[in-house]
Image (tube, rainbow, N blue to C red):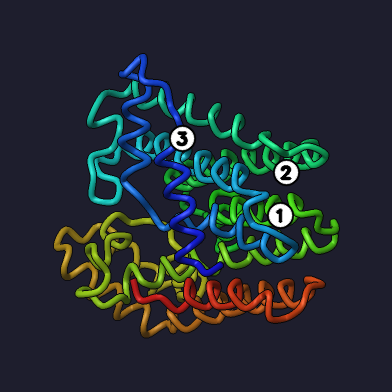
Amino acid sequence: MDLASHTHRIEEELKNLGLPENPEGLYEPLRYFLQIGGKRIRPVLTLMAAELFGQPDKAINQAVAIELFHNFTLIHDDIMDNAPLRRGMITVHEKWNLNTGILSGDVLLIEAYKKLVQNANEHIADILDIFNRTATEVCEGQQMDMDFESRIDVSAAEYIEMIRLKTSVLLGCALEIGALMNGASKENADHLYQFGEHIGIAFQIKDDILDLYADPEKFGKQVGGDVIANKKTILHLTAVANSSKEQLSVLKNLSAESDATQKIEKTRMMYDHLGVKEKCEDLLHDHLGTAMFHLEEVKVEDHLKKSLRELAIYLINRDK
């Protein structure tokens, strides 16, 4: 099956999830949030990994569980970030209220566990162990991200560890579980996990680069949003690590610049002078290379890995 077919299958499963009608105040927000959409990359990865070793349908429940868990994290992330919009739509806590956002998110996590164990059979212990470990790591990553907001000494290495936990481990989890559901060896499943983890890190680095260097007509949101918000992205941390004392002073002054256009333009000029984009692209390709190494180590016929290889390249080469 191709990417579009897997994505369509996930959308159909989400539409037919069978959430109860009552209490309406608990379940209607979930129906609303799930129909907002998204790339569905994580559940698609589960099906693609399963397909390497057999029929992807065998992992459909686990793929849906991964997507439900991801959406649970998004609902709660929106609350913590006080975000008014998600994918251009009003967030759950804004459309309803804070308590509804918390409670609906909680029940979505429970629904994820219900799906996770359906038809898991002899794989249930391993799958629960992987999923539980990943869920904890995602929370750890979110806490690190929040801690960074009040710190001035964050390193690039700490940032990479934060995005590994907050974002990348769930991609690895999705692939590992999909593979195990079709009887993959532990070695093959481990390589797929590492593939997903490093693709996730490269994906976030690309996100950080695009935020400042994307074509505004293609990007779909304001270019330079991270700069305006003084976010400690990999670009900012790389700039700090490669700046002289005088350049650090300039960066500090830029963080207080009130004119958004000037702030973005001057920051980009400083980054260009320091070679920040190129250094971050080198780091991105290091992780992409590591990911591809692990994919090549998976012991299946090479043509079966084509879709995963192409998806990885697409995620890294995208322009929005």
Q: Nearer the viewer, residue 163 or 123?
A: 123
Give the image location of residue 311, x and y in percent: 53, 72
What residue sits right under mark 1 in the picture? Answer: 176
Amino acid type, callout 3: Leu
What residue sits right under mark 2 in the picture? Answer: 130
Crowdedness near tag 1: few (<14), some (14–19) or many (≥20) residues, C-alpha within 10 Å: many
Crowdedness near tag 3: few (<14), some (14–19) or many (≥20) residues, C-alpha within 10 Å: few
Amino acid type, callout 1: Glu
Q: Earlier in the sequence, mark 2 or mark 1?
A: 2
What is the secondary structure assignment of the residue under circle 1?
Answer: helix
Whole-angstrom CA distance, mark 2 to mark 1, is 8 Å
The reply to whether dot 2 and dot 1 touch (C-beta < 8 Å) is yes
Whole-angstrom CA distance, mark 3 to mark 2, is 23 Å
Residue 266 vertical placement versus 61 (above, below): below
Q: Nearer the viewer, residue 119 or 149?
A: 119
Rendered residue at 70%/40% (across/down):
133
Rendered residue at 55%/49% (across/down):
166
